[in-house]
Amino acid sequence: MKKLKLASLLLATAIGAALMGIAQAGPANESAAKWYADGKHAVEIAKELRANKHRAKNIILFVADGMGMSTVTAARILEGQLRGESGEENQLTFETLPYLALSKTYNTNQQTPDSAGTMTAMMTGVKSKAGVIAVNQNVFRGDCASSKGNELTTYLEQAEMAGLSTGIVTTARLTHATPAATYAHVPERNWEDDHDLSQEAIDNGCKDIARQLVEFPYGDGLEVALGGGRRNFWPRNMADLEDAGKTGERDDQRNLTEEWVNNYSNAAFVWNRDQFNAIDADNTDHLLGLFERSHMEYNVDRDADIAGEPSLTEMTRKAIDVLQKNNKGFFLMVESGRVDHGHHAGNAYRALTDAIEFSKAVKAALEKTDSRDTLIIVTADHSHVFTIAGYPTRGNPILGKVVGNDNRGVSKDTFSMAKDGMPYTTLNYTNGRGYAMLETGGDTHYKVPVQTGRIADLTGIDTEDEGFHQEALIPLSAETHSAEDVAIYAGGPGAYLMHGVQEQNYIYHVMKETSRIEMRNDDNDEKNQRMMDWQYVD
């Protein structure tokens, strides 16, 4: 077996023990006077905010795939509880950014969106259909011929044309919808390698997504690409170096990782953690990392990976180290792709722990950059049908079963019961595969039958265990996205433009406006360059 079973984090007993003393009243230092003072202090801080209207030399766009507001709230509480706090008062790192807006996520042809259409909006400034990548809504999904002439220019492409360094980091496959929308143009998100192409696509000259990454035609090519998806870059006659019995999937027999190294000077390809750690950013100008044959591990499963793989935080740091060598600036997109996958599998444990790791990656970026010249935007492409409900008492384990308050407002010492006489969890899904208690969790859920509804008495079930999958109401092969708005958090130059309720394509236009990217594309206009330098200086 490739994967070894990850030892339990032992959160259930730790959280339960830590919370017993604070469940009724919250932290010991809370008081009416403190609540009042804290609120007044928050207003004083807000009064000191000043819009930074300088040009953004660098932009980092963080996208947590599927991180709706319920996911943010639950991850916030869980992170606090992992430190022994009640959790509700905690803040994730990106929640401390000063500016906030809401993003409307629908696609042009779908009320509830997919990641291809949503990331296309963020990267091109144009909303489009579900399932298509960096092409406009005039195309028919899966129809290569219809995409000709309907390609959209992405912000990453513009950055390369302007001489900036560019990078993408993801825990999903590098050819998956969200990262692909930064550099590729296809009418079908599933064309990740040439084996996936339809005959019509081949006849009409469409290129697969992996090939487009390596053949990227703008500037001097991407400087950093880190994630999963080796199978899409290696030929079918090449054995995977980690997964026994598996090979690449390319029919054209091209080894795109070799081509990456040969295409660029000071280039490197890495596929495991030791190789990644050995990379000297000062002497590496083009870095490709493919750490899994498909998606990278969930964060809690990384230590069990045979070859080892870096965390999202580690990849973010390394990417910034490589990119920031360019005095003209850089653009970096960082995706936590597996928040989405944890939810699709109905496993809140993995979705939330990946969201917490995402917050740590944002913290690392804030520490490695200067808010005077770097715009950081944190958002999601869409939400999920993930709910927090049931009137649990303050500090109740967010992954646990509901314990409510009595008629005096004091925590009870027994579980709250549903009308069927059984306890229930705070976190649940409207649809999906439903309840399961597995040895591990996450994607293993797809190997067992769908079990929706109230099919098990949870009294003796450790719902905080990594193998627990929450109950769901409507039986589906996988849990679905939802159509609700998602948040946009921002700090740095131009962040003040994030306000109100916006269409999702607004994000691109903020990046374009703040970076003055069109001015930077005119390399021969020295006056424009002097103007931008002047605008940046305090």
Image: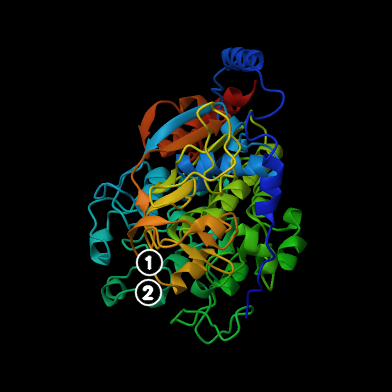
* Closer-to-camera residue (521/426): 426
Amino acid type at circle 1 is: Asn
Of 19 and 154, the residue lying toward us: 19
Q: Amino acid at mark 2?
A: Asp
> Residue 303, how many percent across, how many down?
70, 65
From the viewer's perspective, tell me whether residue 431 is left or right of residue 408: left
Mark 1, Cα crowd under 10 Å, few <14 / some 14-19 / many 20+, is some
Residue 4: where, in percent of width, then height? 66, 73
Number of numbered tags placed on the structure image: 2
Q: Determine the residue positioned at 53% across, 87% down.
A: 237
Regarding mark 2 in the picture, which secondary structure is present there? helix
Marks 2 & 1, CB-CB < 8 Å contact: yes
Question: Can the viewer see residue 70?
Answer: yes
Q: CA distance from mark 2 to mark 1?
A: 7 Å
Query: Camera-side residue: 498 or 214?
Result: 498
Element type where label 1 sits in the image = loop
Q: Residue at x 71, y 26 (%)?
A: 28
Is 86 placed above or below 534 here?
Answer: below
Residue depicted at 63% across the width and 17% down the height:
38
* Residue beneath disc 2: 196
Q: Residue 415, relative to residue 53: is it above or below?
A: below
Horizontal relation, residue 232 to residue 197: left or right = right
The image quadrant that residue 432 belongs to is: bottom left
Residue 533 screen position, x and y as percent = 60, 28
Quadrant of res 277 = bottom right
